[in-house]
Image (cartoon, rainbow, N blue to C red):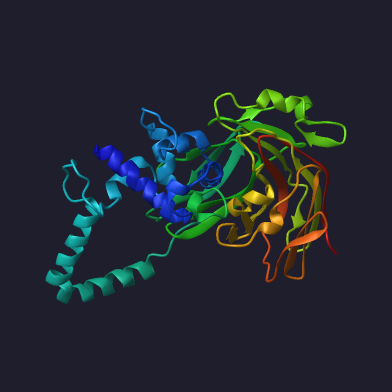
Amino acid sequence: MSENQYYIDHCKALIEEKLGWGNSANWQAQDFENLSEQILIETKTLISASTLKRIWGKVKYQSKPNLSTLDTLSKFIDFQNWRDFVKYCVDTTKPQGVVSSLEPMVKKKIFIYLVAILVLPSSFSLVGFLLQKKAINTLQIDNVKFNSRAVSVGVPNTVVFEYDAMQSNADSVFIQQNWDEKRRVRVDKSHHQHTSVYYLPGYYRAKLILNDSIVKEHDIFIETEDWIGVLYKDSIPFYLQKDSYRHNSWYGISSEEKNQYLPTDGLIPSFLLTYVNRDITVDSRSFSLSVNVQNTFAHPAAPCKHTDLTLLGTEGAIIIPLSKAGCVGENKLRIGEQLLDGRFHDLSAFGVDYATPVKVECDARSGKIKIKLNGKLAYEGVDFKGIGNIVGIRAKFQGAGRLDSFQLSKVM
């Protein structure tokens, strides 16, 4: 085994540990679709499900992952990039055939242990001095600046973050793209710009962080004038022409049009309909949603017809999963920070018949949230804290699908 392959395997193990989805040998195609989406959400970089399958050995492929892919996987487990991961990860078992010295973190632990033994008696006065100095050395933020601008309208879109922390006494500077701390990137204090590419519409609350303190923040909207249709078949999304998914009373791909998207390479596409607009602004603690959705894809390689309906909020998301009844064990229901995995929770109520459109209703008020499918209660939760203001909605279909009669309103 090469040393690089050893680190790739170690990176995969840490990702599996983070996800908690069990042994990857038992992962299904939908798990790699879900992982692709989660990586995109947390790192703003897309790794296609097909690429992930190759890395995990589900598809035979001779070439090794490129550096940009490894960088993204490293960021997903909270490292700055691949080199940072290789530098700081600790070998728990020595790989056969790899000759290397002790990892830096192991050396660091040994060094700290020796220092503690040798200099502990004189360290107390030093610690006291440093604590006193730290208390005096208050973080200076008066002249700190932070703003951003999108270089174009629509998607894909690059956002340029402009910052100035030169006059601050902070030791470290970070830019966090929204409420999720996993999207925090360390930037050079002496520099003034950092960019990110956004492939999907959405809301982001960007933050400038000095040391451990949020000192500046502002909204970023990647908006759409109406619903947009995107097809994912590989790492770069394919944006559909408006007339291919916008119809008189519904949005989606028709029975005739979907035939051109049938997979010829064994990879099932994901069809996304997304609408994001800051003028929506509905309080997620008191709202009512009603929409009809239908997965229209018919192919032997996609018997489950997985469909996710996502409400995008300024502080989180609500993801309502639908599938054929026999596949509910692969569904994942998200209500803000709460995630219910179909492998460990009974989500049988989210098994549906796509012969006709499924009416999805979601209602929240007085700390309670309810989800109904075709008029039947599928989920009810209490002590619902909300996901901030709802600013968008996304429907993700395995293969193809359609929606109509969309209504989102405030509840008084």
- Residue 320, given in percent of the width and then of the height, sits at 68, 53
Q: Is residue 107 left or right of residue 354?
A: left
Question: Which image quadrant is residue 124 in?
Answer: bottom left
Q: Residue at x 40, y 29 (%)?
A: 61
Say if 263 sits above or below 47 in the image: above
Q: Is residue 375 left or right of residue 260?
A: right
| Residue found farthest to the left | 118
Q: Residue 230: in sight, yes or no?
A: yes
Question: Which image quadrant is residue 147 in?
Answer: top right
Q: Residue 154: in sight, yes or no?
A: no
How many badges with numbers are in the image? Answer: 0
For the C terminus, which image quadrant?
Answer: bottom right
Say if 21 sits above or below 247 in the image: below
Say if 133 sits above or below 103 in the image: below
Q: Is residue 195 left or right of residue 306?
A: left
Give whichever of 152, 71 is nearer the camera: 71
Q: Residue at x 64, y 40 (%)?
A: 303
Give whichever of 406, 324 is nearer the camera: 324
- Residue 127, given in percent of the width and then of the height, sits at 26, 72
Question: Which image quadrant is residue 159 in?
Answer: top right
Give whichever of 376, 206 is nearer the camera: 376
For the N terminus, which image quadrant?
Answer: top left
Q: Is residue 357 left or right of residue 194?
A: right
- Residue 13, given in percent of the width and then of the height, sits at 37, 50
Q: Residue at x 61, y 52 (%)?
A: 331
- Residue 210, given in percent of the width and then of the height, sits at 45, 55
Give whichever of 370, 243 is nearer the camera: 370
